[in-house]
Amino acid sequence: MMEESQFYAAAIHKTEHDSMRKKIQAIEDGWKADKDAQKVQNFLEGDFKSWMVLHVARWDSETAMHLGDSM
Ligand SMILES: [Fe+2]
């Protein structure tokens, strides 16, 4: 949808998601290896939580405004 509407920051937004997806994959791999719930909790309450708040506030809200304007 972002690409279809030619959102100027679609590539950056996608990169943000790809970066977090890699971190989540690393957490999953770690979980499978050691079942350390504390590592998962630390990630969710730390990096992931701050990423989510900032990502929604910055990229998702800007994308939504762009999509709304382009309809
Ligand atoms: Fe997003």
Image: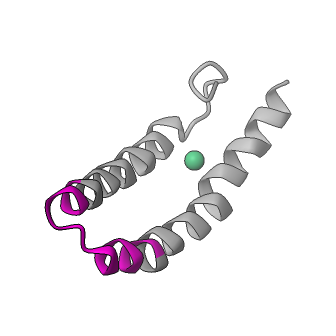
Residue 59, how many percent across, how many down?
A: 60, 53
Residue 65 highlighted magenta (yes or no): no
Quadrant for the N terminus in the image: top right
Q: Please indicate whether residue 25 sits to the left or right of residue 34 in the image.
A: right
Most extreme residue toward the top is: 4
Residue 8, how many percent across, how many down?
A: 57, 36
Q: Residue at x 38, y 54 (%)?
A: 20
Q: In this figure, what is the number of numbered marks?
A: 0
Q: Nearer the viewer, residue 61 or 33?
A: 33
Residue 27, how many percent across, how many down?
A: 28, 61
Q: Identify the coloring.
A: one colour
Q: Residue at x 53, y 36 (%)?
A: 10
Q: Is residue 56 above or below residue 36?
A: above
Predominant secondary structure, magenta span: helix
In the image, the segment drawn in magenta is 29-44
Q: Residue at x 54, y 41 (%)?
A: 9
Residue 32 highlighted magenta (yes or no): yes
Q: Residue at x 62, y 33 (%)?
A: 7
Residue 64 lies in quadrant:
top right
Q: Nearer the viewer, residue 35 or 1?
A: 35
Quadrant for the C terminus in the image: top right
Q: Is residue 40 above or below residue 11?
A: below
Residue 52 lies in quadrant:
bottom right
Q: Nearer the viewer, residue 70 or 34?
A: 34
Q: Nearer the viewer, residue 47 or 39?
A: 39
Q: Is residue 6 above or below residue 43?
A: above
Q: Please indicate whether residue 22 sits to the left or right of residue 34 in the image.
A: right
